[in-house]
Image (cartoon, grey):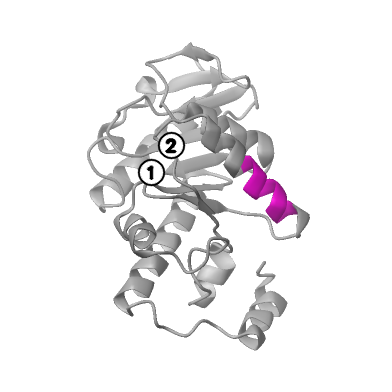
Amino acid sequence: MNEDPDAQALREEICRVGRSLFERGYVHATAGNISARLPDNSGYLITPTDACLGTLQPDSLAQVGLDGVQLSGPRASKTLALHCRIYESDTRARCIIHTHSTHLVALTLQGVWRDEDILPPLTPYYVMKVGHVPLIPYHRPGDPAVGACVAAAIEAANATGKPLRAVMLDRLGPNVWHDSPAQASAVLEELEETARLWLLTRCSAQPLDEAQIEALRAAFGAVW
């Protein structure tokens, strides 16, 4: 493939992260997708529709422009419109990962902590690495209307000075974003692990109190 080395390296990193998530059970079958902003900011790479993240190949990713128009590769994931809205709404986002992570989906079926925060601040690393995660009302997979809901949630969070790293789609799974595939994966894993802990404690564990959270803000710059 005649492509910039940085773009080729990004393709390989997407495939590596997808394979890792699949092998450790964070995604299954053909559920989930990954996208990333190209290094030259000319557009995005995104996994194909109905692709298995465990068997991705660097040259099998779709490439789209900033307007979402596909430029090359197999047909892009049905969630492309949502990914584009997240990139437009949060210029910090360089990679987005969507999964159907078991404990997070189970949490929406059982009932989240609060619509504006699906989980309480249970652990210091959840507070530091993930932050607030709002619930997005159910839409069918690929429904472009969900993009407006997510964009509104990002805008509302930015207005409070507490920007989001993730949202939770009711009955479908999380969308998380960060500076790279590896960092987005780390946010996803922390989010799913916290959901697992919350369910294991029958949703009764005591959250960190305000003094404990303030100490995380002072020591680590935690945004909560």
- Residue 144 showing in the rendered view: yes
Labels 2 and 1: the sequence-earlier one: 1
Q: Residue at x 33, y 80 (%)?
A: 201
Whether 80 is among the magenta residues is no
Count residues near mark 2 (Cα–Cα under 10 Å), then give few for <14, some for 14-19, many for 20+.
many
Q: Position of residue 72 (x, y in %)?
A: 46, 12
- Mark in front: 2 vs 1: 2
Instruction: Tell me the magenta residue range.
Output: 151-158
Give the amino acid at mark 1: Val
Quadrant housing residue 50: top left
Q: Which mark is residue 117?
A: none
Q: Position of residue 2 (x, y in %)?
A: 48, 13
Asked whether 35 or 57 is in front, the reply is: 35
Q: Is residue 68 above or below residue 82?
A: above
Q: Residue at x 30, y 75 (%)?
A: 200
Count residues near mark 1 (Cα–Cα under 10 Å), then give few for <14, some for 14-19, many for 20+.
many
Asked whether 222 or 20 is in front, the reply is: 222
Asked whether 200 or 126 is in front, the reply is: 200
Q: Which residue is mark 1?
A: 17
Q: Which residue is mark 2?
A: 34
Are circles 2 and 1 on residues that touch, CB within 8 Å? yes
Element type at mark 1? helix
Main secondary-structure element of the magenta-colored stretch: helix
**Is residue 198 rendered to the left or right of residue 9?**
left
Whether 152 is among the magenta residues is yes
Q: Position of residue 198 (x, y in %)?
A: 38, 73
Q: Residue at x 72, y 78 (%)?
A: 218
Give the amino acid at mark 2: Ile
**Is residue 11 rendered to the left or right of residue 64?**
left
